[in-house]
Amino acid sequence: MKTRFLAAAAFAGLAFTPLLAQPAGAPASPPSTRAEMQQSIQARFAARDANHDGFLTPDELGENGAMMIERLDADHDGKISLAEAIAASLARFDAADTNHDGTLSPEERAAAMAQMGQPQPAPAAIQPAPQPH
């Protein structure tokens, strides 16, 4: 399974943390609230922590593991703790949550994706209101 960026998950799910690939059975909709984001990161972290030591190492993160360690390893110990993963993800969430209400609106999500250079979903076609005869 290829590792995706939560930036494609926190934003494209608003994939905020370039941390983990979507685990099997995970919901298709991205986290919309800060609490949902934290729960998502905890679940993804647990799914990747193969030896259950509370840290993610490059080998547990797959082909982009070294790059993710470089980006997320705040204490430079060569591994990512759950606290580091959550802090990085919530910082991206908070930056996208421009009105600071703890929820990402579709507009905030689209703006964050555009800022990251992520493709945006096509807008739904607006149907004209029926005209009375």
Image (spheres, helix red, strand yellow):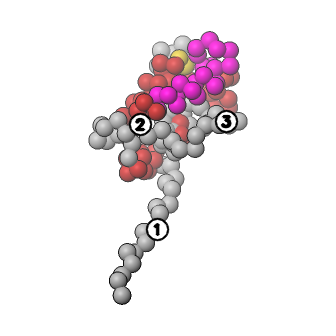
Q: CA distance from mark 2 to mark 1?
A: 26 Å
Residue that badge 3 annotates: 24
Q: Secondary structure at mark 1?
A: loop
Which three-letter amino acid code belongs to the residue tagged 2?
A: Thr
Residue that badge 2 annotates: 33
In the visual, does 109 lie left or right of 101? Answer: right
Give the residue drawn at x 45%, y 47%: 113
**Quadrant that contains the C terminus:** bottom left
Give the residue drawn at x 61%, y 37%: 26
In the visual, does 6 lie left or right of 98? Answer: right
- Residue furthest to the left in view is 99
Mark 2 neighbour class, 10 Å CA radius: few under 14, some 14 to 19, many 20 or more? some
Quadrant of the rendered image containing residue 54: top right
Magenta-drawn segment:
37-57
Q: Position of residue 129 (x, y in %)?
A: 37, 75
Q: Secondary structure at mark 2?
A: loop
